[in-house]
Amino acid sequence: MKGKFISIEGIDRCGKSTHAKLLGRWLRSQGYEVVLTDEPTDGAMGRVIKRALKGEIKVPTDIEALLFAADRVQHISNLILPALKDGKIVISERYVHSSLAYQSARGLPLDWIRKINKYAPRPDLTILIDVPTRAAFSRARSSELDEFEKNIALQESVRRSYLRIAKQDRLKVVKGSRPRDEVQADLRKLVSAVL
């Protein structure tokens, strides 16, 4: 049996982590083996990216995009593909569409970002949890926010990029500002349809 690959996308603080965990718990209760993962990873490239996100090091946007792409290559070969081969369901918080939304919002050409990520297998399902930027922003204390999360204008631009890309790539869009149970119910319906 081949596994299934699900990616969950959205701006910072949209509820990706919460819903990935709830989805994983529900799928396990249904008898599935589930691997929860996220990007950037804890690998060598991912650690550099996390330092850049915290503002500890400065990295030009094009180099950042390449770092994300390199981190993704490792993520795919070390974790995603082996888990899928074993018949597991892989749920990733962030994947290629994060690069497309964030780096294009910061000025890189969408075609170039797609090109450097062309090796990445397409998920069986990509869900965009869409939350208005100010609502997402209000979910955190300012001390918890990294350099990107603090920039509300950037987050607005990223949200617009996500919605534009969601239309182009036919992503499933779920309104994330509703009660958590309603959002989760929508995610479960979408996931059930691909299982």
Image (tube, rainbow, N blue to C red):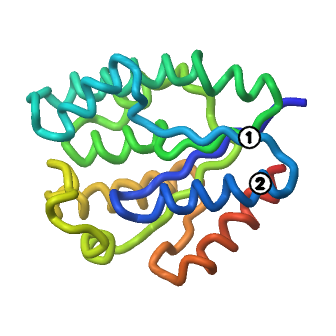
**Which residue does the image show at 57% across and 22% down from the upper left?**
76
Query: Does residue 171 appear in the picture of this structure?
Result: no
Give the image quarter of residue 83.
top right
Image position, residue 18 (x, y; %): 51, 61
Image position, residue 171 (x, y; %): 58, 55
Count of labels in the image? 2
Callout 2 amino acid: Leu
Above or below residue 31? Residue 186 is below
Q: Residues within 10 Å of mark 2 (few under 14, many from 20)?
A: some
Question: Any mark on residue 72, and which?
Answer: none
Q: Residues within 10 Å of mark 1 (few under 14, many from 20)?
A: many
Horizontal arrangement in the rendering, residue 147 relative to residue 110 (left or right) = left
Which is nearer the eye, 39 or 143? Answer: 143
Q: Are marks 1 and 2 in contact (CB under 8 Å)?
A: yes
Q: Which residue is mark 2?
A: 27
Above or below residue 105? Residue 183 is below
Callout 1 amino acid: Ile
Horizontal arrangement in the rendering, residue 7 relative to residue 188 (left or right) = left
Local secondary structure at mark 1: strand
Give the image quarter of residue 55.
top left
Gap between marks 1 and 2, in whole Å?
9 Å
**Which residue does the image show at 70% across and 56% down from the upper left?**
25
Above or below residue 6? Residue 50 is above
**Which residue does the image show at 62% across and 44% down from the upper left?**
91
Question: Any mark on residue 89, and which?
Answer: 1
Image position, residue 103 (x, y; %): 28, 39
**Which residue does the image show at 59% across and 55% down from the upper left?**
21
Marks 1 and 2, the one that precedes in the sequence: 2
